[in-house]
Image: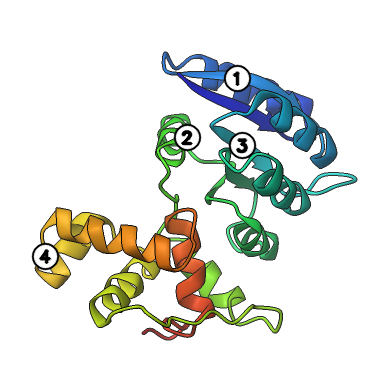
Amino acid sequence: MIDVVVVDDQALLRGSLRVLVDSAPDLRVVGEAGDGAEAVSVVTRTRPHVVLMDVRMPGMDGIAATREVAVSSPESRVLILTTFDLDEYVYAALRAGASGFLLKDTPPAELLSAIRVVAEGDGLLSPSVTRRLIAEFARLPEARPVRLDGITDREREVLALIARGLSNTEITQTLHLSVGTVKTHIGRLLHKLQARDRAQLVIAAYESGLVTAGGT
């Protein structure tokens, strides 16, 4: 069973998300919160697998809450829900430790699938939206430089393709590698870059300069 905490300042939306999540046989809502501070408290107490986190909330916003959750409950994965596909807050949230993001108008079935993906430890990065968002905001002055010392040439290739939004299957086809080999390279990248998941690898790729808005 995958435990979920729903965080949104709109009670109606929280209620709708609870009903949706609880409708899935393998998911259950174990807590709700209406702002960031409450979210941190609820997550710390319940230790869910996934947190559905709104960005814009009164008081402590979703970015600050995500940063706190990454420290207080590192096993909990944060999935950002946002209204705008080019919201600058989303990139900041990914840097704070979020595992991905979805638009609030995402179809219900896709939202439930996204929760499962994030719970398994994979970053959720929509190629149609996330690549362009991260490419835009990775160039902000506050972006922290990341060094790729110790990363092999093949691992750099894999990292660049991850940052472009390719799935493992697409990477195997592009580099003519087996799925097992690709997974091994990704595992080594996670270890070497001290990244929690695929979303953090994308951040590292952009902040290191390996990938830019114009390509690799």
First along the sequence among labels 1 and 3: 1
Report how far apart the C-alphas of labels 1 and 4 lie in the structure. 39 Å
Q: Residue at x 78, y 25 (%)?
A: 11
Secondary-structure class at tag 4: loop
Report how far apart the C-alphas of labels 4 and 3 lie in the structure. 35 Å
Task: Using the image, tell me which numbered label, if any, was put on residue 52.
Answer: 3
Q: Residue at x 36, y 85 (%)?
A: 216
Q: Residue at x 75, y 28 (%)?
A: 42
First along the sequence among labels 4 and 2: 2
Tell me whether circle 1 and circle 4 mark residues in contact (CB < 8 Å): no
The quarter of the picture where the N terminus appears is top left
Look at the picture and state if 92 lies above or below 25.
below
Q: Label 4 neighbourhood size at 10 Å, few (<14), some (14-19), many (20+)?
A: few
Q: Label 1 neighbourhood size at 10 Å, few (<14), some (14-19), many (20+)?
A: many
Q: Is residue 41 left or right of residue 87?
A: right
Tell me whether circle 1 and circle 2 mark residues in contact (CB < 8 Å): no
Secondary-structure class at tag 2: helix
Residue 27 in the image: state x and y as whole percent: 48, 20
Q: Is residue 179 left or right of residue 157?
A: left
- The residue labelled by disc 2 is 115
- The residue labelled by disc 1 is 29
First along the sequence among labels 3 and 2: 3
First along the sequence among labels 1 and 2: 1
Looking at the image, the residue that sits furthest to the right is 59
Tell me whether circle 4 and circle 2 mark residues in contact (CB < 8 Å): no
Residue 44 in the image: state x and y as whole percent: 72, 32
